[in-house]
Image (cartoon, rainbow, N blue to C red):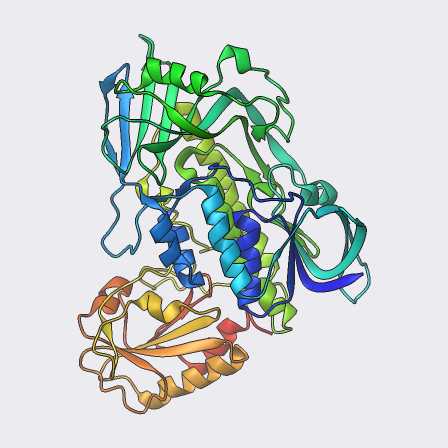
Amino acid sequence: MGDTEVLVVGAGPVGLTAAVELHRRGVDCRIVDRLREPQPYARAVGVQPRTLEVWDAMGLVRDALDAAVPLYGRLTFVNGRPGPRVDLKLPSDVPYGFAALPQYATEQLLTARLEAYGGRVERGTELLDVEQDAGTAGSVRAGLGTADGTETVRARYVVGCDGAHSRTRQVLGPAFEGDAFPEEYLLGDVAVDWDLPHGYAVRSVHQDAAGATGDLLVCVPLPGPGRYRMSMPVPPDLSAAQGQGDEAAHGPESGRAPELRHIQAVLDRLSPRPTTARALRWSSVVRIGHRLVDRYAAGRVFLAGDAAHIHPPTGAQGMNTGVQDAYNLAWKLALATQGVAADGLLDSYHAERHPVGADAVWRTGRHAAEGTEAEVLREAQLLVGYRDSPLVDADPGCPEPLPGDRAPDCRGLTGDIAAYPVRLFDLLRSPHHTLLLYADAGAAAEELRACATAARTAAHGRLNVFAVLAPDAPGDGLGVPRVHDRDNGFRHRYAARSPEAVVIRPDGHVSARLHPPAPEALARHLSRTFS
């Protein structure tokens, strides 16, 4: 019997994110996957700006940017004629744009990060069963099957990131409400020689006189000359409408590998330019479901990613939503395993992420059925927030960003020694909470220093404190690292009021804004998270 703090089941992007974040926080963690080798498939390819922000905090965004290609927008064609062009433009304070990166490359980046922390994926290892202890000891016994037999692992927590066909979910037994779309799709990773603009996805459709879509081609650019991940309806000779209504009817199916000729036939009908497909790297027939579990956790077992929610790939929401499930959960599990979590902290995972999953299932299903486009900021996942979370302190008079909102970046912060400005995100690149104390010349240094001391104590030292000083603020006597808001970028972006305390969680969401701050109020707020 092998013991561990957390057992992560599934080594796709979601499970790897959970394992990396747990290892980053010093949590003993095992991650297993039933596959003996990683899959070399370009399944999930869209990377949202919010996920790049997450990767920035995790320390792997530089490698991701080097490996990815930009995604500037979408070109549309209807019956061979150019339709509306969609440009994915974001506000200037958003640090990253949209990108495309094959799923196998994402997994390679995350695996390298995991190994840098001393972790590894245990491949060829399948979850068989899970049993939670009823006693006060608090643990989970998981049966694992390997090529050498079976093993029982005792863990404090289990995180099921094992996809649409999740064994963890089957054992846990939550309701998985929804259905499967009747259509089947062909996916192919190919290269073409057309002269369409670099960095744009392509959506080409044939519509009848009533405007109904009868044929469809969607192409997402991938790294490499002329390379795209293409999707299209399955031709009759490959169709086998199987599994309709079954919760497992989601994702690639085995036994029906489309050939280059199948893709070429659709290109001959719908390509906006005459072109020849070549260099087929991977193809599959896929079914698409739309389902959501009724609970993301039961006791000490949690679900994340496709194990909890499946939906159409419209807007590349699936993998990105799953990565942020894991990112939300990991820091909470770390505090729980370290014995400093408040009662109910882990309950906030379902409270915060289940509404996000429900929105993704509903929204992507509607867009897929109607062929409509999502709002750019929402598609970028920059509007995901937790204003109703039990962990945040609402303030009716607070300006945006409100507690629960994503903490936006800002530029132009300067230190006392370094000659170059830094971003706010540079201060947040930490596994801990961050307290920002905004002050102008009229702020009382003694009171702010007391706030910093109280907050550090309430967070058991797992909190970084920075003073953000207005141009006229001396900042002497605060006793904490300081940056100068010399261009008033922080004041404008946060509508900051002096003196003010802004608490930002490890996952980059504001949890409280206190104006004026007081040590007792800060400690009371942090007691929602820390014991």
146 to 253, vertically: above or below: below
The residue that appears at 55% across and 45% down in the rendered structure is: 305
The residue that appears at 39% across and 56% down in the rendered structure is: 63
Write down the quadrant of residue 139 in the picture: bottom right
Give the percent coordinates (x, y) of residue 392.
Answer: 47, 63
96 or 213: nearer the viewer: 96
Q: Tally the numbered discs.
A: 0
Q: Residue furthest front?
A: 279
306 or 67: nearer the viewer: 67
Give the percent coordinates (x, y) of residue 156.
Answer: 71, 62
Question: Is 452 left, or right, of 136 in this rendering?
Answer: left
Question: Is 254 left, or right, of 445 in this rendering?
Answer: right
Q: Quadrant of the C terminus?
A: bottom right
150 to 344, vertically: above or below: above
87 to 152, vertically: above or below: above
147 or 81: nearer the viewer: 147
Q: Quadrant of the N terminus?
A: bottom right
Q: Is residue 465 visible?
A: yes
The residue that appears at 74% across and 43% down in the rendered structure is: 171
240 to 291, vertically: above or below: above
Give the percent coordinates (x, y) of residue 192.
Answer: 32, 27
40 or 136: nearer the viewer: 40
Q: Is residue 342 visible?
A: no
Give the percent coordinates (x, y) of residue 324.
Answer: 48, 52
Q: Residue furthest top?
A: 209
Write down the quadrant of residue 136 in the picture: bottom right
Question: Is 169 left, or right, of 361 in this rendering?
Answer: right
